[in-house]
C-alpha cells in the first residue's frame, strides 16, 4: 500500500506498543479523493523517495507510471 503521512500523534488509546502513532491516508486508485485513514506505528512505515506529485501520478495511473525504487537497506543486506 502507498499512503501519505498526515500527522504524528501521541497514542492515547494504547493502539500500538510505541508512544506515537502516525495518521496515514491511503488513497484509492484511480480516484485518490477517496480512501482510508489508518493509525500505524512508525516502525511499520517505509519512507519512499517520492515527491507528493510523483506519488499521486503513481496512484492515478494504477501503478503504471512511477520510478523504480531501490529496496530498503534492511531487505538488501544478507542476514547474519
Image: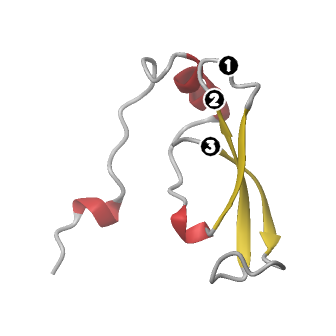
Tell me which numbered mark, 3 or 1, is placed earlier along the sequence.
3
In which quadrant of the rendered view does residue 76 lie?
A: bottom left
Residue 4 coordinates in the image, percent (x, y): 67, 44
Residue 1 coordinates in the image, percent (x, y): 51, 43
In which quadrant of the rendered view does residue 50 lie?
A: top right
Q: Secondary structure at mark 1?
A: loop
Provide the residue designation for mark 1.
Answer: 31
Residue 21 coordinates in the image, percent (x, y): 72, 69
Compared to 64, does 79 lie above or below? below
Q: Taking 69 as reference, is 7 left or right?
A: right
Label 2 packing within 10 angstroms: few (<14), some (14-19), many (20+): some
Q: Secondary structure at mark 3?
A: loop
Residue 28's disc number? 2
Tell me which numbered mark, 3 or 2, is placed earlier along the sequence.
3
Name the residue located 51 percent from the left edge and 47 percent from the top edge. 48
Provide the residue designation for mark 3.
Answer: 3
Do the residues bearing badges 2 and 1 touch, measured as CB atoms within 8 Å? yes
Name the residue located 53 percent from the left edge and 64 percent from the top edge. 44
3 vs 1, front mark = 1
Residue 35 coordinates in the image, percent (x, y): 70, 35
Compared to 52, does 78 lie above or below? below
Amino acid at each position: 500500500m502507498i499512503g501519505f503521512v498526515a500527522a504524528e500523534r501521541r497514542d492515547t488509546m494504547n493502539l500500538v506498543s510505541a508512544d506515537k502513532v502516525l495518521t496515514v491516508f491511503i488513497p484509492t486508485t484511480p480516484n485518490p479523493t477517496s480512501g482510508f485513514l489508518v493509525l500505524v506505528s512508525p516502525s511499520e512505515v517505509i519512507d519512499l523517495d517520492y515527491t507528493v506529485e510523483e506519488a499521486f501520478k503513481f496512484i492515478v495511473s494504477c501503478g503504471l507510471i512511477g520510478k523504480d525504487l531501490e529496496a530498503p537497506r534492511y531487505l538488501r543486506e544478507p542476514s547474519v
